[in-house]
Image (spheres, rainbow, N blue to C red):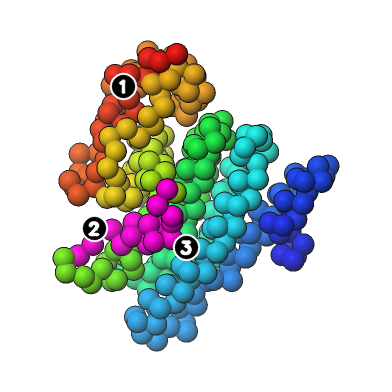
Amino acid sequence: MNENIWTAQAVETAVIEDNSNLEIILSNYFQTFIERLGEYEINIQEITTTELLTQKILEGIEKLEVLRKEFISVVKIFVPSDNSILKQYLPRFFDNLLKFYEEKGINLYAGTGADVLRNDHYRFFNQFLYISLTSILLENKCFETLKSILHAKYQVYDKAYQILRDVNFIRFRTYNYTLNQFLNTTSPKRISVTADYIRNYSVPSEFEKLIKADILLYYISLWYHIDKIFNASWFPELSVYNRDEQILPYMKSRTYFEKAKVLFGVNTVEEYKKLLEDTRENPDWTGMYRIPLVQTGLLYDTVGSVE
């Protein structure tokens, strides 16, 4: 597909001109975007030292950051009006993204072998992109669109077991050994170098929203986890920077709750509270990650109390 035609600028122009082919243009842009990711694949046969591999991964992170910002800029074109086109095409985008990784032999599970480590720049990109997208959709109250990607199910082929495995958004976050282990050389060590990198790539006001989005992804993963063998839940690394007990503070508004409840698969405040009451949280988090309990972070005591 010609990446010189299906660009972010082409999508923006189509929106401005009210082009009747907007859906085709956006769909082709998303597919071209995925294909461009292949330019940053690291050929392990060309790597002679661990230092060179680390260098290539860091270069890949820097280059892929340009693509992340571009992708978010395209999404921002549609979110002010909560355009249903995103609800339709974003789940398809992530399905195709997983297929791309699979076809390229890009293993997304964490590990320390060179053939797995060579994908750490993709792991960082996936994690940062998903948190950023969640944050933007939350900020603009695009709850139906956010639901469409958080509740979507995908299938990937597990070569080790030679079976198709059901996965969901949790697949886009795995531990990054290059950042959190091999580059974590300060004394004392950083809690999460991945979180540090995301913070460095973000403006302060944006980063505060990313923290909350990351923790919300963890909460949602407690109810919608599929791949129980490798990734039982989304790990919110940005919570190391969290200072707020309320993750969705506007949930106390009845109007906000009525719009946001689709994320939780409930219809009433009573059902919402029952969901929080029945939630089994992960008991293994270290105290250095500041993750409010679900009932605290999602305003169990005051949800829907303000008209």
Task: Give the residue type that dot 2 points to.
Answer: Ile
User: Residue 302, percent across and down?
Assistant: 33, 19
Give the residue number, with chain letter if any, for mark 1: 300
Can the viewer see residue 235? no
Q: Residue at x 62, y 37 (%)?
A: 80
Q: Which residues are magenta?
A: 189-205
In this picture, residue 97 sits left or right of residue 108: right
Magenta stretch: includes residue 195: yes
User: Residue 265, percent across and down?
Assistant: 46, 24
Q: Which mark is residue 281?
A: none
Q: Marks 2/3: CA distance?
A: 21 Å
Q: Is residue 193 above or below residue 18?
A: below
Q: Residue at x 62, y 34 (%)?
A: 82
Q: Earlier in the sequence, mark 2 or mark 3?
A: 3
Give the residue number, with chain letter if any, for mark 3: 122
The quarter of the displayed image where residue 21 is located: top right
In this picture, residue 68 sits left or right of residue 240: right
Task: Give the residue type that dot 3 points to.
Answer: Tyr
Q: Residue at x 21, y 45 (%)?
A: 285
Q: Is residue 296 above or below residue 164?
A: above
Label 1 close to label 2 by CB (< 8 Å): no
Classed neighbour count for the residue bearing mark 2: other residues with Cα under 10 Å, few (<14), some (14–19), many (≥20): some
Give the residue number, with chain letter if any, for mark 2: 191
Q: Nearer the viewer, residue 85 or 15?
A: 15
